[in-house]
Image (tube, rainbow, N blue to C red):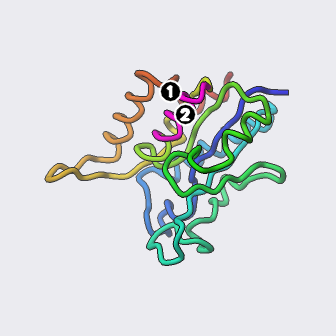
């Protein structure tokens, strides 16, 4: 049995063009994520899907029971794959993610999904803090333009900055083709 897991974070309808919070490059990232998921399944890795949901029915985005919180069709979980619901950027915080990983004897994880600067960053850092060897597949992640004061930061720069920070201290950052070839 494989000691590797793929954690697919928040590839949900809300982030696609028809959703309330679309990301730059989400279609390309999701297409790469689908390839990685298919490869992980063939390799016998544990595949875990994480889905963000706000705790209130009045939330403007990621509203419980809305189409926006549904995992996008392109990365639909297969029967038997765990789906973890979270309420915070860190996929480990107040969820059963660590329990699921430990139950399967997981030692290495790969993280893909959305948003690079928020949930991917928080999940990767927590994964490393829990002792898992962690890889991030950068072209299977997406984010959005940000603003800080008067400064507008394009999504490509937000994404590159987060991936550089992750690679600097938190693990390997590779592309889809490299991940699949392993």
Dot 2 alpha-carbon crowd within 10 angstroms: few under 14, some 14 to 19, many 20 or more: many
Verify whether residue 124 appears in magenta: yes
Residue occupying image coordinates x 55% and y 28%: 128
Can residue 178 be seen here? The reply is: no
Task: Please report the residue visible at 38 percent of the width from the left and 29 percent of the height from the top.
Answer: 165
Rendering quarter of residue 132: top right
Q: Quadrant of residue 2?
A: top right
User: Residue 12: horizontal and vertical position, in percent?
Assistant: 57, 59
Quarter of the image that includes the C terminus = top right
Marks 2 and 1, Cα distance to the nearest angstrom? 6 Å
Residue 112 among magenta residues: no
Q: x and y percent of residue 24 in the render?
A: 41, 52
Q: Which residue is mark 2?
A: 137
Q: Which mark is residue 173?
A: 1
Lower position in the chain sequence, tag 2 or tag 1: 2
Q: Is residue 50 visible from the viewing direction of this image?
A: yes
**73 with respect to 92 (left or right):** right
86 or 17, which is in the foreground?
86
């Amino acid at each position: 049995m494989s000691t590797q897991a793929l954690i697919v974070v928040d590839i949900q309808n809300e982030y696609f063009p028809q959703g309330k919070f679309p990301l730059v490059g989400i279609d390309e990232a999701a297409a790469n994520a689908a390839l990685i998921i298919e490869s992980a399944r063939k390799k016998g890795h544990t595949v875990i899907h994480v889905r963000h949901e706000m705790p209130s029915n009045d939330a403007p985005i990621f509203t419980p029971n809305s189409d926006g919180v549904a995992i996008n069709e392109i990365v639909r979980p297969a029967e038997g794959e765990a789906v973890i619901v979270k309420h915070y950027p860190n996929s480990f915080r107040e969820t059963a993610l660590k329990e699921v990983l430990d139950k399967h004897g997981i030692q290495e994880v790969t993280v893909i999904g959305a948003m690079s600067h928020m949930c991917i960053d928080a999940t990767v850092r927590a994964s490393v803090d829990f002792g898992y060897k962690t890889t991030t597949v950068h072209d299977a992640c997406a984010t959005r333009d940000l603003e800080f004061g008067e400064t507008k930061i394009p999504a490509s720069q937000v994404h590159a900055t987060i991936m550089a920070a992750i690679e600097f201290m938190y693990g390997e950052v590779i592309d889809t083709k490299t991940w699949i070839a392993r």
